[in-house]
């Protein structure tokens, strides 16, 4: 059975992630919204690098994957994994979550928990994407 991010989250996080997952379905229907989300997530990551350092490299992979999927350059990922990735980015970007980001020191704890759960659940897809990226680079594309 495929791992789901929800299995690793608290009840409150699961509820909030469910809302983000529903929003992700809407975002995925409009590429412009997807690109705005990616832009906003890059900005938030850059601004809060220290707070999310544990997952920052993996978040960058999620962002590159989401952008490549949105531009139709990369489609070698199941829909469910794209949905999880976008939901995690929405959860990360949204300032209203289980623990508000404004609470210094602990504000990003739930963001990191959700990102970690999603990254863990779609790890094989992320590895395939990174392999695809490396292949493109080696081919000069």
Image: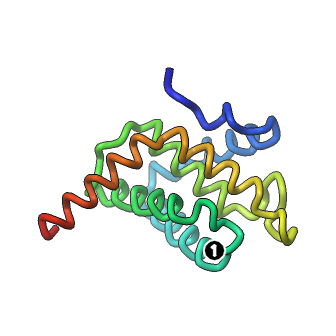
Total labels drawn:
1
Q: Is residue 77 left or right of residue 118?
A: left
Front-most of 85 and 57?
Answer: 57
Most extreme residue toward the top is 1
Q: Is residue 96 left or right of residue 117?
A: right
- Residue located 50% across and 66% down the image: 38
Q: Position of residue 82 (x, y in %)?
A: 45, 45
- Residue located 28% across and 53% down the image: 131
Count neighbours of disc 1 (C-alpha within 10 A) and say few if under 14, some if 14 to 19, many if 20 or more.
some
Q: Quadrant of the C terminus?
A: bottom left
Q: Is residue 76 above or below residue 44?
A: above
Q: Position of residue 138 (x, y in %)?
A: 16, 65
Q: Position of residue 83 (x, y in %)?
A: 50, 43
- Residue located 12% across and 64% down the image: 139
Front-most of 56 and 6?
Answer: 56
Q: Position of residue 30 (x, y in %)?
A: 45, 55
**The quadrant where residue 42 appears:** bottom right
Q: Dot 1 corresponds to which residue? A: 49
**The quadrant where residue 96 appears:** bottom right
Most extreme residue toward the front is 54
Q: Is residue 63 above or below residue 84?
A: below
Q: Is residue 20 left or right of residue 127?
A: right
- Residue located 62% across and 43% down the image: 117
Most extreme residue toward the left is 139
Most extreme residue toward the bottom is 47
Q: Secondary structure at mark 1?
A: loop
């Amino acid at each position: 059975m495929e791992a789901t991010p929800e299995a690793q989250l608290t009840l409150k996080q699961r509820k909030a992630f469910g809302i983000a997952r529903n929003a992700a379905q809407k975002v995925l229907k409009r590429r412009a919204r997807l690109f705005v989300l990616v832009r906003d997530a890059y900005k938030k990551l850059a601004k809060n690098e220290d707070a999310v350092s544990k997952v920052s490299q993996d978040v960058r992979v999620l962002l590159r994957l989401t952008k490549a999927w949105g531009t139709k350059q990369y489609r070698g990922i199941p829909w469910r994994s794209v949905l999880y990735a976008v939901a995690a980015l929405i959860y990360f970007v949204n300032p209203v979550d289980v623990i508000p980001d404004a609470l210094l020191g602990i504000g990003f704890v739930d963001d990191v928990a959700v990102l970690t759960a999603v990254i863990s659940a779609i790890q094989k897809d992320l590895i395939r994407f990174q392999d695809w990226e490396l292949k493109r680079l080696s081919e000069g594309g």
